[in-house]
Amino acid sequence: MATAAEQLARNMNFGTFAKAKELQNRILFTLFILVLYRLGTFIPLPGLDAEAFSQFFQTQQGGMFGSINMFSGGAIERMSIFALNVMPYITASIIIQMMTSSVPSLEKLKKEGEAGRKQINQYTRYLTLGFAIVQSFGIAVSLSGFAFDDIPRWFFIMTAVTTFTGGTMFLMWMGEQITARGVGNGISLIIFAGIIAEMPRALFNLFSGSREQGVNVVFVVGVAALVIALTVFIVFIERSQRRVLIQYPKRQQAANQAAQGQSSFMPLKLNTSGVIPPIFAIAILMLPMTLVGFSGGNTADPNAVANSTGIMAWVATNFSPGSWTYIISYGVLVAFFCFFYTSIMFNPEETADNLRKYGGFVPGIRPGKNTAAYFDYVLTRLTTIGAIYLVFVCLMPEVLRRYAPGIPFYIGGTSLLIVVSVTMDTVTQIQSHLIAHQYEGLIKKSRLGGKRKK
């Protein structure tokens, strides 16, 4: 049976949206921030020889750099001020969330509500700054060979570190502004905007490459059909949930009156972690490959890999997209972060305690530890299915890339998952604002009606 909120959402139309002025302002503000982000991806790094770097990038785009460039909206290819994108922030978030589960002081902050959450966010910002400086310095040293001859090396490195770090911190601020003053999901929307901006070119390369390389047209149409089927599959899984029945007992209201018992559902999504696991996995996998690429190891050229030595040669050989080592590592990281992030988002013991405080219980399950064990059992089964789903969606294009390296399969998989999931979350956020606006209108009407009766 549909809930009251779902029934109200079904009755919404463009007239309701036209009256929601606050929502319109939020959407316009979000679009304004995303336009600023796209403009920033076209501002080049000062002092860099763009033509020389473009030639270098052409040899790297078949590997990890092509995928990273897709997520950054082309900022890597143009080596713009937003080349680092939000990856330092994502890496910092991974570490802070891991520490929140293991460090008592951070775990205590997490339980302090809004004040604790603000303090944890502040720690994440500090760590983001540290990662941005370190990564900017490494990239700046490697890029110094592409600087103009008349620019001192130390000055170029200092300028690049300042520019990249400032670009990352500015992107983090823009994401927070979208979350607070826009439609929400700020960081995810920034990644979403980068992928959407590069998808038309990826699709063009797919069809033009099939014509130039003599790829069978039927095969290309099959890839397009696979992308459509994958989109439908992602939507179906993301909307799937297990509803756990929660029963509330009767309560005495007056001397001879007793309220009837109420029942509700606790929705547990099949994929509780959303798009966080693949984003976290990419943030970790890109670190060694970025180091290899900018230190001179050409992951797309076997001769360059053969000439490199030691650890860099092993990393370049075994962690290039399409290699089995990369595929297995990617799958393991996605599955790990799926379970890890779900454990952070949903605590069975805390949920069971809250139910017991308010008198709620699961029919047939004793309150307390038994309820917590039941939630843990259900959530483990759901997370296992969700992890298998995420691994399948993310790894399928990588396996196809291995057997058809000329086709840009990065238009599917992780990028498609992020686009579909973020779109659904954004629509849900907009719908929530519209429902709140309708409720406010109903409350105002009821108050005015009450005054007229008097």
Image (cartoon, helix red, strand yellow):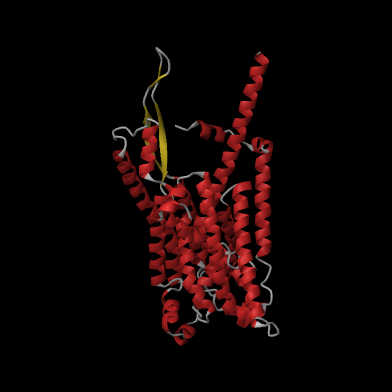
- Residue 406 visible in rendering: no
The quarter of the picture where residue 101 lies is bottom left
Residue under the image location 63 percent in, 73 percent down: 160
Image coordinates of residue 35 in percent, x first then y, are 68, 57
Judged from this view, the residue extending furthest toward the front is 105
Residue under the image location 65 percent in, 19 percent down: 449
Q: Nearer the viewer, residue 45 or 353?
A: 353
In the picture shown, does residue 453 fall above or below 28?
above
Image coordinates of residue 283 in percent, x first then y, are 49, 64
The quarter of the picture where residue 252 lies is top left
Total labels: the figure holds 0
Left or right? Give the position of 399 relative to 420. left
Q: Nearer the viewer, residue 311 or 197?
A: 311
Residue under the image location 42 percent in, 40 percent down: 267
Left or right? Give the position of 93 relative to 256. right
Q: Quadrant of the N terminus?
A: top left
Image coordinates of residue 286 in percent, x first then y, are 49, 69
Image coordinates of residue 342 in percent, x first then y, are 41, 51
Q: Quadrant of the C terminus?
A: top right
- Residue 274 visible in rendering: yes
Judged from this view, the residue extending furthest toward the bottom is 307
In the picture shown, does residue 310 fall above or below 356?
below
The quarter of the picture where residue 277 lies is bottom left
Residue under the image location 55 percent in, 60 percent down: 126
Left or right? Give the position of 301 relative to 360. right
In the picture shown, does residue 45 fall above or below 148?
above
Judged from this view, the residue extending furthest toward the right is 150
Q: Nearer the viewer, residue 454 or 325?
A: 454
